[in-house]
Image (spheres, rainbow, N blue to C red):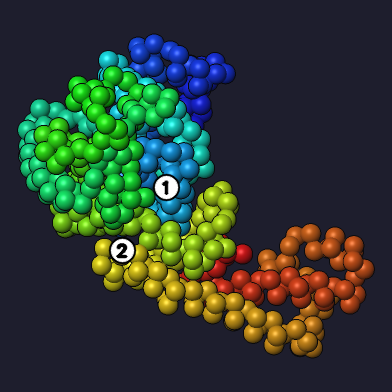
Amino acid sequence: MEFLEEFDEIISLSANGDLAGFIFDSSKDELFEFAETLALSSKYHFKPEKNTNSNFSFIANSSLSGGRHPCSEMSCRRKKLDELISFASLYSDEVHIQNPFEDILVSGPKSISTATRQELMYGISNYIYLRPLLENGIIKYAQNMVSLCSHHSETLAKPLADKIRKKENRLYDLLEEQLIDKCTIFFDIKEDGTRYLKINGPSELIDHGAMFFYFYDTPPDFIISLYEKSLPYKLTKNEILSEGVLGLIISPIIEDLSNQEWQSAFYGTSYLCDNPTQISIASKLNSAAYTANSLAFNNAMSHSLPSVYSKDISSIVDLRNKEAEAFSVYRNKVHNLLKTTDKWSESDVSEIFRDEIVPEINMIDKKINDWKVKTKDSLKEKLIFGAGSVSIGLYAGMLPPNIGDIVAAIGGGGAVAGAVMDYNKTLKEKMEARTNDFYFLWQASK
């Protein structure tokens, strides 16, 4: 794919064999130019389609895009990316992920910090990890920068921006009101001098039940004023509210939902989230938008069909390309089942996989096993294939072109019937399996 070649060349020419050294040691202007080039390249190669299928075209939140929120640790990021990969490869036409290079372009060179450099490094690492899906156009970079003429800016963008802004303000107040009574926030300093905030709260609001925010650059004056406190220092409710500390949690959620709503309005994509609370909020803010839960899909797949879930990403993508029609049939069937759920709740999706999909996979296995038992010792099966029927089979295109070489190699005569019978069984097995709507999923599990 032209995009991959171009992206690789940009990285190679800039980094000159030392990517980490370039990212962390280069000047702000140099780094900005690098991120700008990556952003513009992805913008050029991933122009949104005009006629997307909203049932299978999604815009992912920042967590599923490998972003820093709610946890910037590599293992957590990779876990979220694996959720994205599972959902994208086994269900979607395309998933647009948040573009870390565009974020830097929008913010400008003066805003580049240590955290910016870290996110750029993660962004390139995620690009490499998602490469098979990027190559096949299943994963794409989202475009939150939209160019419009003055007319469409006034008639489309401004009304939508005003609408979203009102939602953002209302949502911030609602989340802050909910969090202030359920969260405790501490400030502390590690032995190595690292300053941080620790926010404790219920897992449905805060992943892992706790979040840590570290200050690597110059911290706000309010944080500096806490240095002389008895540590760890518990912030009061008044301090939390007056300093807007909960914005550390709320702002990324609002930014996610705003970006998703822009994408949905302009390009017809559906929402893809991994947090039930965020899904609930999204469904209330934009009840008309289709919202999918990657976590529910991922858990249902891994628990019900672990042999599919554990497959290498490239093998699933190759199977999708090879069995495109079977994939569409299977995916439409799954979609029709999932439409009955209430915004893709995890329990409902797991129940559908357990009660509706797994029995179908088992039924395919049973039909094939029954067919094998019935034909294993069948004399009729052997009599069908004589030397003459080999020629007929070749003429009809039912046998491999090199059947003559096979016959010669294995000794002809009676061996011909056995070899051809085995080949015919393989064909019949696939024919038996193909009659089921879940053939693709069954094949993926083999």
- Answer above or below: position of 409 versus 387: above
* Residue for point 43% across, 25% down: 192
Residue 143 visible somewhere in the drawing: no
Residue 341 sits above or below residue 298 on the image: below
Q: At 26% across and 63% down in the image, what residue appears?
A: 343
> Where's residue 407, x and y in %?
86, 66
Residue 247, picture quadrant: top left
Q: Quadrant of residue 162?
A: top left
User: Which quadrant is the C terminus positioned in?
Assistant: bottom right
Question: In the image, what residue type sits under mark 1?
Answer: Lys
Q: What element carries label 1?
A: helix
Q: Pointer 2 and pointer 1: residues touching (CB < 8 Å)?
A: no
User: Would residue 276 be seen by someone viewing this image from the given angle?
Assistant: yes
Residue shown at the point (42%, 27%) measured from the top left? 191
Q: Name the residue under label 2.
A: 344
Q: Position of residue 118 (x, y in %)?
A: 41, 27
* Residue 253 vs residue 375, the one in the foreground: 253
**Observer-nearest residue: 63 or 48?**
63
The residue positioned farthest toward the right in the image shown: 411
- Indicate which disc, 2 or 1, sits on the residue closer to the N terminus: 1
In this view, the mark in front (2 or 1): 1
Q: What residue type is labelled 2?
A: Trp
- Disc 2 element: loop
At label 2, counting other C-alpha atoms closer than 10 Å, the crowd grade (few under 14, some 14-19, many 20 or more) is: many
Depth check: give the residue in front, 370 or 358: 358
The residue labelled by disc 1 is 80
> For this view, does 174 lie left or right of residue 425?
left
> Percent from the top left, x then y, of residue 88?
42, 52
The residue sitting at 30% across, 33% down in the picture is: 231
Is 87 situated above or below 150? below
- Give the Cα distance between marks 2 and 1: 17 Å
